Amino acid sequence: METYYNPEDLSKFEEIGKNAPDLAKKFFDYYNAVFADGALTEREKTLIALAVAHAVQCPYCIDAYTTDCLEKGSNLSEMTEAVHVANAIRGGASLVHGVQMRNIAEKISL
């Protein structure tokens, strides 16, 4: 089945710099610095990235960070829990906007 998303494109990510090498270098330098060990370990940062990938629904990122998580020693239970954290935040963000809906509905109903 053909889809817009082609998993093979993930390996071509660095090609994004072909026509803008300076901007690509800045992005990849920043990206690599963000994911280096710091107050959080690379493993912890990769779990965060996996959760964010699900929140923003990026199939390329989900593929990449699933692999990275496994390579950095995370297990499926930790990864699933990270996805649930993303879901809880995303779902909660939708629900809390329900307060805005209720405020407007109550104002119009008066």
Image: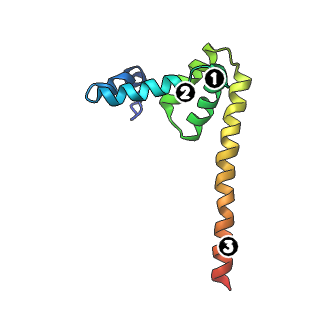
Disc 1 secondary structure class: loop
Asked if labels 2 and 3 touch by Cβ distance under 8 angstroms, the answer is: no
* Eye-nearest disc, 3 or 2: 2
Q: Residues within 10 Å of mark 3 (few under 14, many from 20)?
A: few
Is 37 placed left or right of 19 in the picture?
right
Disc 1 to disc 2, how far (Cα)?
A: 9 Å
Which mark sits nearer the N-terminus, 1 or 3? Answer: 1
Q: Position of residue 19 (x, y in %)?
A: 25, 29
> Which amino acid, mark 2?
Val
Q: Contact, CB < 8 Å: mark 1 with mark 2?
A: no
Classify residue 89 by image quadrant: top right
CA gap, disc 3 to disc 2? 40 Å
Kindly identify which residue carries mark 1: 38
Closer to the eye: label 1 or 3: 1
The disc labelled 3 sits on which kind of residue?
A: Asn
Sequence-wise, which precedes: disc 3 or disc 2? 2
Left or right of 3? Residue 91 is right
Q: Name the residue under label 3.
A: 103
User: Which residue occupies 52% across, 24% down?
Assistant: 33
In terms of secondary structure, where does tag 2 sit? helix
Measured as percent of width and height from the top left, residue 103 is found at: 67, 73
Vertical placement of 33 versus 96: above or below?
above
Query: Which label was assigned to residue 34?
Result: 2
Amino acid type at circle 1 is Gly
